[in-house]
Image: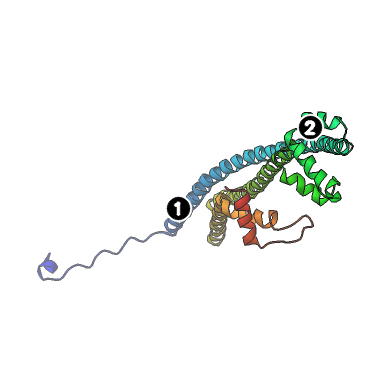
Amino acid sequence: MTDVLAGVANPPPPPPQRSKDDVEQRRRSRIELLAAILIGTAAIFTALATYLGDGVDGSITATQNESLRLDLIANDIYNDANAQRAIERDWIFSWITESQNDSPAAAYLEVAMPHEVLALAVEWNDADDDVADPFSEAAFNSYESHGGLLSTQLEVEALLLLERAECLAFEGQVLEIQGENFGVSQVFLATTLVVGGIAALLRRRLAQYIVLVTAVLSLLSGLLVLSLGTDEADARATVAADFFSFDEQNMSTVSPERAVQEANQQCPQ
């Protein structure tokens, strides 16, 4: 009391000294908290990657099945078109033969033949000999100019189905790229779950730090690959570079940038 009255303050009491065990416990608590955050974050995104991956797997199966179905239908229609073209050629050559011989059968054929077939027969009869060859380029061009022919209509229908089947095959490969990214992200995220749990069990400080850094890097890698899986544009560009850049002889025909443009034009999203 005398010191206070004299204006001399007592020195503050020294802070309580923490024991080595208290310091270690606080450090371990921080490590366990960080590990819990990493594990919780990884668990959430693992569930998301699994959900997205399962959805993509189902879409891949449906897309591939539909592509195969359309391809089979298109082939059947092409066969029907070839059979119909053979019938049309028989009509044409029979009419030309009968007409040049002034046979009455030509008139009966004119009644029985479809209008477009008769028009093509007249065109071939008035043209040079090259058109009369059913396998010549001139004959092919002549067929193409008569869009009303049933055989031509069937070929157009088959071509449209094949184009749709090809686009579905392209979309299936895009989905496969996305599914692969989702699968890889699940591996990284699962690694984070395991490594994060190990970090909380270790005693040595250096080992804990190494394991935690590994868990963080694995988590970041998983999130990066997961983001790539959700980026459909990137997956389309990757597939287009192979799907639309090479011809039947596996020779590169266009640049990757042009391949992406081709993909967007032929198979829009």
Decide: is 123 above or below 23.
above
Residue 251 falls left or right of residue 183: right
* Identity of the residue drawn at 78% across and 54% down: 248
Q: Amino acid at mark 1?
A: Ser
Q: Secondary structure at mark 1?
A: helix
List the single residue furthest toward the front: 102
Q: Nearer the viewer, residue 77 or 59?
A: 77
> Can the viewer see residue 235 in this picture?
no
Question: How many C-alpha atoms fall within 10 Å of the one at disc 2: few (<14), some, or many (≥20)?
Answer: some
Residue at mark 2? 110
Which of the numbered marks, if any, corresponds to residue 29? 1
Q: How many marks?
A: 2
Decide: is 34 above or below 161.
below
Q: Nearer the viewer, residue 30 or 18?
A: 30
List the single residue furthest toward the right: 101
Which quarter of the picture shows residue 104? top right
* Identity of the residue drawn at 65% across and 55% down: 240
Question: How many C-alpha atoms fall within 10 Å of the one at disc 1: few (<14), some, or many (≥20)?
Answer: few
Decide: is 17 above or below 232.
below
Image quadrant where one finds the N terminus:
bottom left
Position in image of residue 51 (x %, y %): 56, 41
**Dot placed on the residue nearer the N-terminal end, 1 or 2:** 1
Q: Amino acid at mark 2?
A: Glu
Position in image of residue 30 (x %, y %): 45, 55
Position in image of residue 143 (x %, y %): 76, 44
